[in-house]
Every structure is written in C-alpha cells, then in structure tokens.
Image (spheres, coloured by chain):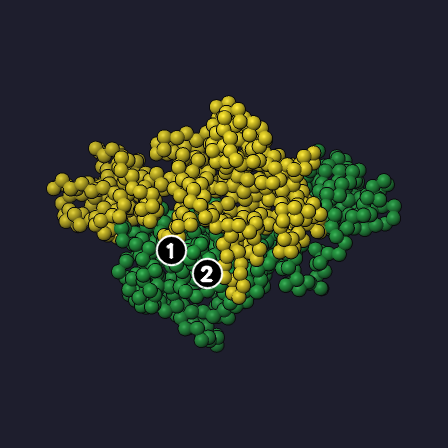
Chain colours: A yellow, B green
Amino acid sequence: MERIHSTAIGGRVGQTVKLAGWAQAIRDQGGIMFIVLRDITGTAQLVISGELLEAARSIQLESVIEVVGQVATETKSHSGVEIQVSELTILSMAEPELPIPVVEKSDAPTDQQIRLDWRFLDIRKPEKALLFKVWTELERSFIEYCTEQEYIEIHSPKLMSTPSEGGAELFEVQYFERKAYLAQSPQFYKQMAMAGGFEKVFEIGPVFRAEPSSTPRHATEFNGFDLEKSFITSHQDIIQEEERLIVHALTNIKTKYGEEIKRLYQRDVHIPVIPFPQLTVAQAKEILGKLGITSEKEGDLSPEEEREISKYIKETHGHEFVFITEYPASVRAFYHMRLEDKPDITKSFDLLWNGIEITTGAQREHRLEILIRQAKEKGIGTESLQFYFDFFKYGCPPHGGFGAGPERMIMKLFGLDSIREASYIYRGMKRLTP
Amino acid sequence: MERIHSTAIGGRVGQTVKLAGWAQAIRDQGGIMFIVLRDITGTAQLVISGELLEAARSIQLESVIEVVGQVATETKSHSGVEIQVSELTILSMAEPELPIPVVEKSDAPTDQQIRLDWRFLDIRKPEKALLFKVWTELERSFIEYCTEQEYIEIHSPKLMSTPSEGGAELFEVQYFERKAYLAQSPQFYKQMAMAGGFEKVFEIGPVFRAEPSSTPRHATEFNGFDLEKSFITSHQDIIQEEERLIVHALTNIKTKYGEEIKRLYQRDVHIPVIPFPQLTVAQAKEILGKLGITSEKEGDLSPEEEREISKYIKETHGHEFVFITEYPASVRAFYHMRLEDKPDITKSFDLLWNGIEITTGAQREHRLEILIRQAKEKGIGTESLQFYFDFFKYGCPPHGGFGAGPERMIMKLFGLDSIREASYIYRGMKRLTP
C-alpha cells in the first residue's frame, strides 16, 4: 500500500490508508490511546486499541511510526481527521527526553541558542518548515522569471585568488601550497559573463563574509540571488527588472502559501504596486532630518534610518518597499558607474523592505580607463585586479545588476526578528555548528 | 527605440530596428562595409556606407556596437538577415589584438590553458554559450521536477566544523580564531532535513574537494544537484526518482535546444527508456572479466571499466545509462545502509552515462547503533560526529538520496572531453584564475 499524507485523507472516509510520520502527542486513556501523527503536510489523530496497545505504549514522543488504518466516519479530533489503526510499525524510536520541545508552549519559548543547537528538532515545527517551503517557492519564482526572460544561469567559483569586495571580512583558505579567498559576492564573475556576451545572467549561491559582529541582520555565510544584465541605459532598468521579479515571486507565494502564512503567522502577503517609491539618499536624509532622526553615517543610512524611512514611506505611500538611490561614490565600491552630471554620485540603489536592506544594485562602470581611475581613487592595488580589468578591454557592453538576500526576504515576509531564524543552518562568528 | 535580437529580425523586412552586439567580422570593400554583428541569439549582417564609413573603419573586431537600420528586402548574407545601417554607436571599443580568436578556425584550435586564461572571450563562441543555456534548462528542469513533487529546497552551510566525507581532500579555512572546513558534500545536512521532518529535500550548490590530481573528470570546486527522500523502502526508490528526473530534464532540453545541439555539435539528445539497465558491481566485474578488462580496483570500477561497461550496455541494450548497484561496504562511506541478507554489501548505486559516473546514491543507515558501529569499523573518530549522530536519536525515518554532477552531465550531453570545458570557470590544483 502506498503511503499518503495526512492532508490527503479528507475524501477517504471508510477507506483503509497508510500514514507515516512523527508521534507529536500521545494520550493514553487505558483501553484506548490517541496519537497525533505529524507529517510534512499536517496532522492526523490515530486511535489505537486492543492488541496494538502494548506496542503503542512503548512509543516515545517524536518517534517515527507507520500505521495502516481505516479513516473514521465520525471524528472528535480537532484536525477533523481520525484513523482507526489496524497495523502499527515503529520505524525509529526516539529517546525519552527531548532536548527541546517540538510543540512549544508560547509562554515559555526555548532560548534561541539552544534551539539552534538542536536545529533538526526546531525545524520540525510546522511554522518553521513553512519558512523553507516559502523559500523554495521564492527561489523557484526567481528562476522561473529569469528563465522566462532568457537569462542564463551561471555558477561562479567561490574560491578566488583575489578579494571581490575589498580586503576586509575575508575568509582565507589554504589552497594546496598557496592562499585562496572565499567569494564575498559573485560580482566580478557576473560581470565576466557580460564581457563574455551572455547579456543576461543570474546566479543563486552562497556568499561568505568574515563578519565579526553578531547582529540579527548578519551571518558569515548566507545566500545571494544575483542578476546582471547588459545593454541597459541606467540603473533604473535594473530597478524595473527587480520590481517585476518581486511582484512575480510574491504573487506566487501568496497564491500557494498565503493562507498558511496567515494561519501560522497572522500576516498577510502584500503584493506591492509598481513602480515602488524611490528616494535619493539626499532626499531620505532630508526627510529623516525633519523627523529628528540623524546618524553619523554620511551618505548612507544607518539601520535605524533604514527602519524610519521605511516607516515613513509606509505611512505616506502605503508601500512596504522603497528604493534608495544615488549613493555617493565614497560609500560604494570602485566599480560603480557615476552620474554624468554628478561625478561624486553613483548610479546605485538599495532596496529596503519593511525597514531592512534586501538588495544592493547599480549600473557598473564598463569603460576601462574610468574604472581604473576609480579603483586608484579608492587606493585599491590594481595589480591583483588585472584579470578583472581585462574583461573591459575587448568589448564590454554597458551593464548592471543587483544582489538580493533571500534570508532577509524570508525574515521580512514572516516578521522574524533575526536572520538566524530564516537560515536553514546559521553561521556566525561564534557558531559553526551543527 | 527598443533593441531587438538578431533572431527577431526575420519578419520585419522594410522596418527600422535597433540591434546591439559584438563585431564578429569586418569586411571593408571601399565604398561599402559589412560587419557581422553577434548577439546572444545569433548574427546579423550590417551594411554600412556613406557618412558612417569613417566611424565604422575605426571599429576593432569584438567591439560592442549599437546600430539602427532598415531590414533589407533582399539579402546576400548567409544568415539571411541584413541591415542597412543608418545610425552607428560604438558602445565599447576593443583593443586591436585579441589574445584568442573568438571565431576559431577548426584546424588551429587554441590551447585549452590559454582559452581558460581568457575564458570571457572563449565563452563568446556560440557553441560555448550553448553549454550554459542548456545547463540553465537542466537546472530549471531539476527544480521544476522537485517542486512539482513538493520537495523543499535547502541551502546547507559550506563552512563546517568537521569533514563530511572523511579527512582527505579537505580545504581548511581560517575561521576567526579557529579552523573550519569547506563542505565536500551536503550529505550530513540533507540527512538533517530528514531528521527534521522535511521528508523530501533538494539542494543545488557548490562542493569542494582538495583533489590533487588533474584528470579531465575532476575539479576542486564543482556543483552538486542533491536530493534526499524519506520513507523509502530501498535505494531502488531513489533510482526510480532519478530516472524520472533525468527523462524530464532531457525531454525539456531536447525540446528547447535539440536542434541547436545538433547544428553546433552534430549530436542528438536521446531520451532514455525507463527503467534504465542495472548491474551489480559483481555482475559488472564478471562481464568485464569476460571482455578481458580487469583492474586493481576491487569492488569498484576504474575509469576504464566505467567506459567499457557503458559501451557494453550501449551495444547490448541500446541504452546510454546504466545503474551500477550493490557496492561493497569497503568502498563506501560508513553511513550507507547494508543489504539485510548481505551485510558486506551496501544499498548503493552509481549512475553511469556514456562511460562516466554522474551520480552516487544510496539508502542511508538511520538506526543509530548500527550507524555508530559502521563508523567505528571504518576507524572514524565518533566524537567529532556527535552532532551528526544526534540526528538519529529522536526519530529519523528511513531515507536515501543521491548527488549528481551537472558539469559531468553537460560534458556527456555534448561529448566534451573535459569537465574544464563544461565549467563556467574551472578550478583545479594549478588553476585559481580567472
């Protein structure tokens, strides 16, 4: 008999079915036992009596069991699904004391560090599993959009001979007899694809930052959704591409998981209106000044400023997203293209979603002499970047792109307070396990 | 005016269009010039005369140009598409001497090492770009299949505190004040998802092997398509899943790119018949012995044996694929489940495609006491694996999965002689650039 999921039982009253999953709750009433069986789709109540009671009584919470039984015609289970068990197999017995509860009482949540230690038990909770179901749909939608638009997917190397984003926050690797570095972004190799004539590429992969701080927004290893496009006229082309992409993904997520997100997180998925609001850094700073919010960050927004400007846009425009554009060259990498009429300002943007930066993007400088000049201005040794500069010597079209962070997007979609909750397995300065 | 691609010109005779791309060939006939313009979809012939000749004469091969012009009513171009140019813009001028030719004469191919040095020029060739278009479709199909089957996507950490596949071939990372290792496979973390109740997961990501050899089949960094599934009854369930997946992907590839693969590589995409042939290692060895092919590899196939057994299956069954099953425990990792009736034999398989292993898979051992015993038998220190053993303590269903290598699949699909040609950017012991 083929195993079915608990959510597939609905129309099968009276039929015999096979289920398998985790014993989430066990109630022994003497002559009858009830077990709540959880699988990846939901739960079913098992009713056990007679000869099976002895075996059933040995079952520890969170053991994996398989049962065959008849779908009850009438049921008192709150999930509305009850199985009168006729066969019972214990596939994997759990040890008696769970290190953390899988069904957590809301008034006594387990400490985050302990939950991260026992991440495999933590993700058994349906509300945790949902994060990764939605991530899957987010990523599938990203790929669907890109492939429909004829983007080519690349997988750029994570082992590099030279840093991609400057010398700081870099992990060093012993590479046979020499040193290599872990890629902090696929930036150079996305641009290589533009020089290589691929015109439009995307990449999904890990990025590494030796981030010594432990904020709720940072990790030492996280994921990037990256995109790069040739023959653009400005960063606005990239902004428009990202708007369409986000609307596409959120629409899919709302259709497939909107109700479940509502049920488990009491949150609605809002489909943003295109175009998203935009503010230059200077405009944002002016608004923030009027609101009495200042920071020492010149030409860039502090985390508090990001939160406040998002709040302001939400209140004035009813929009969860806002593009911040025109960052000064002083706070952006050397490879950013600058505005024709404002040579200190880059053709760049960040995208904020409900108070946090989820994307950084720009038009890149594709004219070699200007690119080298900008690198020198930043005090960057041009020798180690020779391979990169070569990309621009033999015909490289104007291009730009962005990098978006799925962990942060999941965090904002679900209103989580830390990226650690949105990572399958979080990595930080003090955490390299499990 | 919106730029269009060269392949979109067809139905627009007499219309004015905008094109952009690379100057692949330039022919100056005095009063008239012809430029073959290449974009990611194909080529068009530009006809330039009059005032534009001066600017056109400055164009170096492989420069990026943008033109506006009328689609000619009659054409002598072999591509059948000709544009009478009325506007010409040089977007990015190439330096005069190309380090490698982009259009290569078949009788004088550039040395592979030089081509890899100038990979961004190498991938401009339409036959190279096609590899990555097909890879994109392969990966899209993998994700499409998995998400249709309700698999959850995970992104497991590439930074680990302990080796995943044994101590050899391991890259060490300086992780703040301690050591970390680059993941050699997502094995442990796929299994964690099974202990975490995700039931079915897949992952696409890089894997790292400090492989000191430089064979055409190996790289130090490559990509893995990984999948893991719970509630299986044996490795045969995983074999069947992979068969369906491969047929799904190859069908999509044939539909979208079959003609282009035929045109540029003179190869047909064959859709394999399900079920794929299977041989146990013992059976394969027996056949090879009769064919007079022997190797010193006991219980495992040498590269030559893989080629020969594939050839044999091709001849006898007309099939490009063959599953080799039942590898002895001695040649497989400790976490493999063994056959009930043959305790020295694992529930494992490799999949060979046209002579090369593209997949390794198995049912895993989910019973903790057996798993620990098997680790000890292999002489593996169980202390550093405590976090992994914990996965099996609190209810872990039977499960199995596989890891497949897209580089090798692309290699076989196109009949390439080295994985270096199938990697966007190859990494080997002696190559860490570009």
Image quadrant where one finds the C terminus of chain B: bottom right
Residues A385 and A134: in front is A385
The residue lying at 49 percent from left, 42 percent from top is A405
Disc 2 and disc 1: Cα gap in Å? 18 Å
Q: Along the horizontal axis of the image, is A67 left or right of B432?
A: left
The residue to which callout 2 is attached is B172
| Position of residue B358 measured from the top left corner of the image (x, y, whole percent) | 48, 60
The residue to which callout 1 is attached is B188
At mark 1, the secondary structure is helix
Q: Along the horizontal axis of the image, is B227 left or right of B393?
A: right
Residues B68 and B177: in front is B177
Q: Establish whether labels 2 and 1 are both on one chain.
A: yes
The residue lying at 73 percent from left, 37 percent from top is B17
| Position of residue A57 measured from the top left corner of the image (x, y, whole percent) | 16, 47
The residue lying at 41 percent from left, 73 percent from top is B298
- A157 shown above or below A277: below
> Could you say which quadrant of the image residue A238 lies in?
top right
Mark 2 or 1, which is nearer the eye?
A: 2
The residue lying at 70 percent from left, 58 percent from top is B100
The amino acid sitting under disc 2 is Glu
Name the residue at the top extreme.
A316
The amino acid sitting under disc 1 is Phe
Q: Which mark, residue B110? A: none
> Which chain does tag 2 point to?
B
